[in-house]
Image (tube, rainbow, N blue to C red):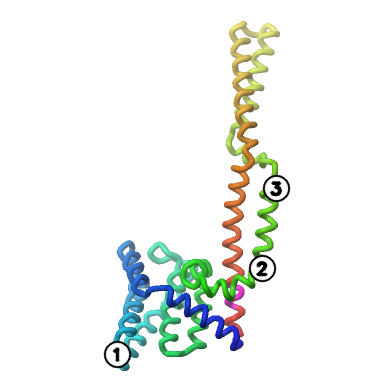
Amino acid sequence: MDIVTLQLILKAGKLSLDAIKKEAMVKQLNILIQKSDQLISREIKAAYEALDDALITSNIKTREIRLNFCEENLLKNTNLDPGLTTGGFSNKYWMALAHNGLAFVCTLREDSNLAAKHLIKIYECDPRLARQKLLPELYVQLFQPQCKNVFDWHEKELKSINESNFVPMDALVKTGAVAIAIGSIVAGFSLALNTRNGFSSSQNSFAGSRIAQGGFKIAEEVWKNSNNIESFRQDARNKLHKQLENKLDERCQEIARSLLSE
């Protein structure tokens, strides 16, 4: 990792770390533990509490003991199975919190290189949590400029959606209204036709006419709904936003792994 990148990471990371109150983090962990008391959440909470103690103690030896305790509890939770969940949260979330705390520890020990690596590790573990909550400043300064291809793709897709003037037929079919309308019209005409050919009574003829009219009414309603283009555009935009977030996650992880391999 070159010195310029290192300094950028540390500067942006410091702004983000300063913006996060460790007391607030402990409170959040307390809430999580109340909902689901798990060993992992307890260890990470204990680590953050030790970190707070280390910051307020004036005794150097006591400070280092608290930092060692914090480090030990966090390190054991940096290699969890990312495919599993604990306490209703993905293990990626807990791993990111562990690296976040370790970045604090390394910063207090003035180990710049290791602090930077832990900050980048947060992006490797849980890029969405990193860019939206834990390290948004680092995202703006380092990761976002390298996501241009993702934003270009999003802009192109969004333009296509906004310029679209048709409703996909499958969206209408899913409502079942099209089938009902067609079925009603066909049934009504069939009944009316059979009546005219002498197969039924005048009452059936009238009924057939009413069924067909009902079918046309449903069809008319479907047509009105199908012309509500904006609602379908909005649905498409919502889906596109989810795709954007997923692609940004993947790209941020790629960048993080590249930085960690240098």
Residue 260 figure quarter = bottom right
Q: Does 76 appear above or below 184?
A: below
Q: Residue type at mark 3? A: Glu
* Secondary structure under the numbered disc 2 in the rendered image: helix
Dominant SS in magenta: helix
Measure the alpha-carbon separation of dots 2 and 3. Answer: 23 Å
| Rendered-image quadrant of the C terminus | bottom right
Q: Residue at x 66, y 54 (%)?
A: 158
At 35% from the left and 81% from the top, the residue drawn is 51
Residue 248 falls within the magenta-colored stretch: no
Can residue 257 be seen here? The reply is yes
Residue 192 drawn at (x, y percent): 66, 13
Could you give the CA–CA distance between mark 3 and mark 1, rounded to whole angstroms?
64 Å
Placement of 45 over or under 176, stated as above or below? below
- The part of the chain drawn in magenta is 253-257
Which residue is label 2 attached to?
A: 148
Q: Secondary structure at mark 3?
A: loop
Residue at label 1? Answer: 58
**Residue 124 can be seen in this image:** no
In the picture, measured across the screen, residue 106 lies left or right of residue 261, that is left
Amino acid on which the number 2 mark rests in the picture: Lys
Left or right, 222 with reference to 105: right
Residue holding disc 3: 163
**Along the polypeptide, which appears first: circle 3 or circle 1?**
1
Q: Position of residue 190 (x, y in %)?
A: 67, 17
> Which x, y percent locates residue 123?
53, 73
User: Is there CB contact under 8 Å for labels 3 and 1?
Assistant: no
Q: Earlier in the sequence, mark 1 or mark 2?
A: 1
